[in-house]
Image (tube, coloured by chain):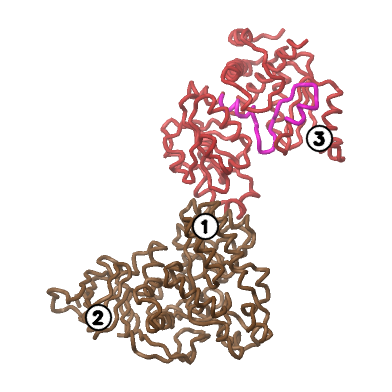
Chain colours: A brown, B red
């Protein structure tokens, strides 16, 4: 084996270069050696492994920057390994795991632990996000400098907004000095306290306590003002409402160093999908009105929201098979991210290349990662995907340890045929 | 009776009457006044190294130390300064006085004032306290540290230490490192050093640098190696433990790793660098013992010696004005 692989007869989709068309890619020693647009690679040696894509789409491996697992502390929900297997099955070749574990990733030794486990698992690339505050409790700053040195890609308190403005201000200005990106969930905790759904006619009819959509804008405006004060970079952890999107648009127009994500759940579902108290649809932030969902789709189409995440949040059956307001929030999404995203291509809503950008080079560039692109010298993280193949999502057959998927029973189009990380096939093939 | 070395006599001939009644702030001073004080202090350093140290310059004068904040070091320094000049020194610390019974700052001062002190040395935890007192008493007030505002005698002794180590202050590159935000020592030093022509920069995490400090004509660094690169003097400030542990700095070990002075970082400074610290030091937090105790770089012990001399110079100059007022 020469260690050289050629992917031929494929449709290359590379948002980083803007190319969407036929071509081929040569991989050598874990790195992309050549990208040939509209043609085959020249003069390949005899022992090169040639993979005929038969017209399938070849795109950069997905970079999912918001994934929760249960490791360390709640391994029954999901381990790093089971999450990595789900990622590989979904074409996600890089993922950033959230720090609100037990113990939290709030000091360099736990950062080292995650990185070591990822190396041992040898599947997809796993990166830790560090906690912004100790224990992600929102009170005292965590060892941001040491964690950055140890390799965390950004800092966040994950699901818990930092309520004390003085604390967030200090975190932002301290992180800025170390060049570390801060991610923050915009949600006013008092307005959202006890809420199980988004406030509105549906929640009222269903008798569910609701959080008003405006709770997102209120906290976001505060966060943006602190960004203006400190000059720090902020990653807005999921915009899901029209009002907040408007605030974000104004902040961008003012030139603030802010980037926003949204989750595949908020693109794909609205509150009505909760239906008959389907707890697989219970997520945080909650599913919103259809108007809000349309605003999110438009924002993604316009490039205002640049990044889409799976917001993979495993919850075992015993935590979901409860009355709606008692059920744990969260939806798994690593395996369904790509086909769900492709829905917007199949519906003609968002061009394919723009869709793929939100899960490849956009998140990679934000975090300074070399992957997420089909370029000579980039890591050979690739996905071969049959763009039109129909798939039926069966939650029980999902690879992740927890099966809480709101896509259960849905028909999607887009089948991952093969996932490659650093030139090694980790799924399919 | 008391013999003074020849050098001191010469300086005493140059003893001047301080033009202001109070010694509250480094920003009140001008270059000439500072130069005179430093020259006078130099003379007192020589005096203090003799066996027979006592002079009569303040004989008959009463010096009151009014320390609302604990400080053995500064209080002893002033006490010694006063006694060596022949003054009667009284130490007041609020814990044992009526202040703790709820008497206000002003009432206390007015009460003490009735005892006709000539010089009142005040340390208080509120910025502006010394100035407030100076408006209510009839004697001269020396600010021994008011809140986070100023500590002018510290800046004077720091300048004296630097001048004696380098022969000059103009053109020196001085890095003030650490908790600048809460430091009156830093504020007084920035003012005084800039007045004397030094190039001052601040080094620390953004959470410990005062907002808008860039308007003080100082360069601000959050990377310590860059901040002390090529510097002649590295002045380390103490970081209070309550401010670490996640409040303004995540932890002691993170603070020391990025902002503590150790050999490795010190190597970025000029070859002839001198290290200073107003004390008391938190060893292993802002400064490594190895560096603090190395007499070939550390001026820290000198600073203590300079402190008494500098304070003697201030007290003498204020007292000379009192003489003239009579």
Q: What element carries label 1?
A: helix
Magenta residues span B131-159
Residue in front for this viewpoint, B244 or A58:
A58
Which chain's residue wears label 1? Answer: A
Given contact means CB atoms under 8 Å apart, are the residues at marks 2 and 3 in contact?
no
Whether residue B301 is situated above or below residue A276 in the rendered picture: above
Residue A91 part of the magenta segment: no
On whether disc 1 and disc 3 are found on a single subunit, the reply is no
SS for callout 2: strand
Q: Which of marks 1 and 2 is in front?
A: 2
Is B135 contained in the magenta span?
yes
Q: Mark 3 — on which chain does it sit?
A: B
Q: Which of marks 1 and 3 is in front?
A: 3
Which residue corresponds to the image point at 16% horizontal and 79% vertical from the top-left? A47
- Locate residue B252, reporting x and y percent: 57, 51
Tell me the quarter of the picture where residue B140 sits.
top right
Label number found at residue B105: 3
Establish if B132 lies above or below A375.
Answer: above
Give residue A416's position: percent from left, percent from top.
35, 84
- Report the disc number at residue A144: 1
Specify whether B295 is left or right of A42. right
> Is residue A76 among the parts visible in the rendering?
no
Distance (Cα) linking label 2 and label 3: 83 Å
When asked about the image quadrant of residue A325, the answer is bottom right
- Label 3: which secondary element: helix
Q: Distance between the residues labelled 1 and 2?
A: 43 Å
**Gap between marks 1 and 3 measured at Cα:** 42 Å
Residue B248 in the image, given as x and y percentages of width and height: 60, 51
Q: Earlier in the sequence, mark 1 or mark 2?
A: 2
Residue, x 64% and y 85% (percent of image)? Answer: A324
Q: Label 2 belongs to which residue?
A: A10
């Amino acid at each position: 084996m020469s260690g050289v692989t050629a992917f031929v007869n494929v449709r290359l989709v590379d948002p980083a270069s803007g190319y969407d068309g036929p071509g081929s890619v040569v991989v050598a020693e874990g790195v992309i050696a050549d990208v040939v647009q509209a043609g085959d690679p020249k003069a390949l040696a005899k022992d090169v492994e040639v993979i005929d894509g038969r017209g399938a789409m070849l795109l950069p491996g997905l970079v999912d920057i918001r994934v929760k697992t249960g490791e360390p502390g709640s391994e029954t929900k999901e381990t790093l390994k089971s999450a990595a297997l789900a990622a590989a099955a979904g074409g996600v070749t890089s993922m950033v795991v959230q720090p609100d574990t037990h113990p939290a990733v709030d000091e360099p030794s736990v950062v080292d632990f995650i990185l070591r486990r990822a190396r041992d698992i040898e599947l997809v690339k796993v990166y830790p996000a560090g906690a912004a505050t100790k224990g992600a409790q929102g009170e005292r700053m965590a060892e941001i400098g040491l964690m950055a040195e140890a390799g965390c890609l950004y800092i966040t308190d994950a699901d818990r907004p930092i309520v004390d403005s003085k604390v967030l201000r200090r975190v932002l200005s301290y992180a800025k000095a170390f060049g570390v990106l801060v991610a923050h969930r915009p949600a006013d905790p008092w307005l959202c306290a006890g809420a199980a759904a988004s406030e509105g006619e549906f929640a009222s009819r269903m008798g569910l306590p609701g959080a008003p959509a405006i709770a997102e804008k209120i906290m976001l405006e505060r966060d943006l003002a602190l960004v203006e004060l400190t000059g720090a970079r902020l990653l807005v952890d999921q915009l899901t409402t029209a009002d907040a999107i408007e605030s974000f648009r104004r902040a961008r127009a003012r030139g603030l160093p802010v980037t926003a994500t949204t989750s595949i759940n908020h693109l794909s579902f609205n509150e009505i999908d909760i239906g008959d108290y389907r707890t697989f649809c219970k997520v945080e932030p909650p599913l919103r009105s259809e108007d809000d969902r349309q605003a999110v789709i438009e924002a993604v189409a316009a490039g205002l929201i640049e990044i889409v995440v799976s917001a993979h949040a495993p919850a075992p059956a015993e935590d979901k098979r409860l009355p709606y307001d008692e059920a744990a929030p969260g939806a798994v999404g690593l395996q369904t991210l790509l086909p769900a995203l492709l829905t917007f291509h199949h519906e003609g809503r968002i061009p394919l290349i723009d869709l793929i950008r939100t899960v490849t080079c956009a998140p990679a560039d934000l975090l300074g990662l070399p992957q997420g692109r089909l370029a000579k010298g980039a890591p050979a993280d690739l996905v071969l995907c049959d763009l039109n193949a129909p798939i039926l999502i069966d939650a029980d057959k999902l690879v992740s340890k927890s099966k809480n998927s709101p896509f259960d029973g849905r028909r999607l189009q887009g089948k991952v045929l093969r996932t490659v990380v650093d030139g090694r096939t980790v799924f399919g093939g | 009776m008391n013999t003074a070395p020849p050098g001191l006599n010469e300086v005493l001939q140059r003893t001047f009457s301080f033009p202001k009644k109070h010694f509250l702030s480094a920003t009140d001073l001008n270059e000439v006044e500072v130069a005179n004080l430093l020259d006078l202090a130099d003379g007192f350093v020589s005096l203090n190294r003799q066996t027979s140290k006592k002079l009569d310059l303040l004989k008959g004068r009463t010096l009151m130390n009014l320390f609302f904040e604990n400080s053995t070091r500064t209080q002893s320094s002033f006490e010694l300064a006063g006694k060596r000049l022949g003054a009667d020194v009284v130490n007041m610390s609020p814990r044992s006085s009526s202040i703790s019974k709820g008497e206000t700052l002003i009432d206390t001062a007015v009460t003490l004032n009735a005892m006709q002190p000539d010089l009142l040395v005040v340390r208080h935890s509120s910025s502006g306290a010394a100035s407030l007192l100076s408006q209510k008493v009839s004697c001269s007030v020396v600010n021994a540290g008011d809140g986070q505002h100023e500590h002018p005698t510290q800046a004077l002794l720091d300048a004296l230490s630097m001048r004696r180590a380098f022969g000059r202050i103009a053109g020196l590159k001085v890095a003030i490192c650490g908790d600048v935000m809460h430091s009156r020592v830093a504020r007084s030093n920035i003012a005084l050093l800039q007045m004397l022509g030094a190039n001052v920069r601040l080094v620390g995490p953004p959470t410990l640098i005062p907002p808008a400090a860039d308007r003080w004509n100082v360069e601000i660094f959050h990377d310590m190696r860059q901040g002390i690169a090529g510097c002649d003097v590295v002045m380390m400030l103490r970081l209070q433990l309550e401010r670490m542990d996640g409040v303004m700095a995540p932890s002691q070990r993170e603070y020391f790793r990025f902002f503590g002075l150790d050999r490795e970082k010190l190597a970025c400074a000029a070859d002839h660098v001198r290290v200073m610290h107003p004390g008391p030091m938190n060893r292993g937090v802002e400064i490594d013992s190895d560096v603090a105790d190395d007499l070939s770089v550390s001026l820290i012990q000198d600073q203590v010696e300079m402190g008494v001399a500098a304070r003697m110079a201030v007290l003498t100059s204020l007292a000379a004005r009192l003489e003239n007022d009579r």
